[in-house]
Image (cartoon, rainbow, N blue to C red):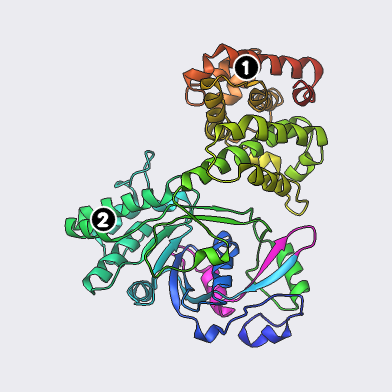
Amino acid sequence: MTTIENATLFRLPRHVARPSYDRSTVKTGILHFGPGAFHRAHQADYIDRLLAHDCRWGIAAVSLRSPGTVAALARQEGLYTLAILDEAPSFRIIGAHNRFFGPGEHAQVRAALVSPDLKIVSSTVTEKGYCLAGDGTLDFAHPSIVHDLARPDAPESLVGWIALGLRDRRDAGLAPFTPLCCDNMVANGRKLGAAVAAYAHRLDPNLADWIGGEVRFPDSMVDSITPATDDATRTEVAAAIGLRDAIPVRREEYAAWIIEDIWPADAPDFASVGVVLTHDVPAYELAKLRILNGAHSSLAYIGLLLGHETVADAMRDEPLARFIERMIRIDIIPGLPPAFNLDHYADEVLRRFRNPSIGHRLSQIAWDGSQKLPYRLLDTIAHALRYDRPVDRLAIPVAAWMLFIHRQARGGGEIIDPLSDLLFEIGQSDVFELKLLGISNIFPEEIAENETFRQALTKAIAAAQSSGPRSLITMI
């Protein structure tokens, strides 16, 4: 089968969308570190649509570690397929990438960073790629940071590359680019900016001062479920487009990109392609964490106790789906700032959960509960207690997590969690709920010692143990 490239686009079936712009006219206005599946399914889709009316924003793809994706992009001249997973899947060819750099191409990346056309340096390198310590500041003991401070002209880390690029632009008399972190970290722009400033200060305090005065680091939030590409995906895409594509990506139809509105005057017209520009990114982050992630974890623990396997399976259990919707609308939304239409967002979340084309396994969502529950559910509970709102329904997913730990421990099952050994030991106890409530790393004192919450929790656990787990969603 023929490979997808510029010369073979004419072979695409009519139902497959393709770039609507002349790719030969596209400039490189964005350099992106970490061109993995999420970036190519999410940010690149927005930029591809932007290029239809502004050719300045082509993307240079840079991989610091693995050459596989950028090499495949180069072979396919930057083209690949985006499959949208909905009841009726659709396929679109993305052509936003026009330059490709892999490990070892330091000179080429450095030259690209000082191009006058370049305005944005974005990144999706996962949280660990920013070399941050536990408190969110730069970890100067990280091996990559130690290396980069010793050899700043040949950096390994993203922070080192951004600092080098900004130094070169300052020395060349060019305006700085705007670093744009697209990884899921709270206050991601501020954390990246602080890390780059701290690193630069160790090398050259004057550079750190210039960065502090001239460079903007917007916060951002991204959202779209993007399952991993597998051989079945490649086979499906080949059948749909009639061409071989080594690196297709797939995602749900829903996508959101929220960016802090602190851009220079020559920034892209992000709003024209659906990006939300706001001065309150934290409000969107909080809504996602408590509505989407809180409901996800609740579905996972209650759904697993009821024998469901995926989110869509759990949402087909109508009593469970009604419970989740009531919890979102009655218990979670009242504790959030009304920065945007939260009821509409809840509608979107519930619709996404019902998507049968996304096989999101509840067992995967259940991983690392000790790390997730404090932000996804316990913060909502703490807020409700402070304002004397009921917590009976909110206590139920916490009870379900405890029952899940108890079931796994008693049955010799797997507990995937940083605290797995402790949880496994406690889970075998007859008074597991009280012992779990006593783990201060999970439950703050204002919750663990609150009699209202304790009563709601023990009532839910007692009901499940005496009448079965379905009683959890019918007791309220």
Tell which of 411 and 474 is nearer to you: 474
Tell which of 15 and 78 is nearer to you: 15
Tell which of 359 and 279 is nearer to you: 279
Measuring 79% from the left and 42% from the top, which residue is drawn there?
313
- Pick the quarter of the image with the N terminus: bottom right
* Disc 2 residue crowd, few under 14, some 14–19, many 20+, Cα 10 Å: some
Residue 49: image quadrant is bottom right
Where is residue 261 drawn, in percent x and y?
43, 56
Tell me which label, 1 or 2, sits earlier in the chain. 2
Q: Label 2's element?
A: helix
Identity, as a three-letter code, of the amino acid under mark 1: Phe
State whether residue 96 is above or below residue 359.
below
Q: What range is drawn magenta here? A: 62-89
Residue 75 colored in magenta in the image: yes
State whether residue 387 is above or below residue 58.
above
Q: Is residue 131 visible?
A: no
Residue 5: image quadrant is bottom right
Comparing labels 1 and 2, the label whose residue is closer to the camera: 2
Residue 65 colored in magenta in the image: yes
Tell which of 46 and 4 is nearer to you: 46
Where is residue 179 drawn, in percent x and y?
38, 61
Identity, as a three-letter code, of the amino acid under mark 2: Gly
Measuring 48% from the left and 22% from the top, which residue is drawn there?
444
Q: Label 1's element?
A: helix
Where is residue 153 drawn, in percent x and y?
27, 66
Measuring 56% from the left and 31% from the top, which residue is drawn there?
335
In this rendering, would 234 be left or right of 50? right
Q: Is residue 332 visible?
A: yes
- Mark on residue 212? 2
Q: Which residue has dot 1 on it? A: 432
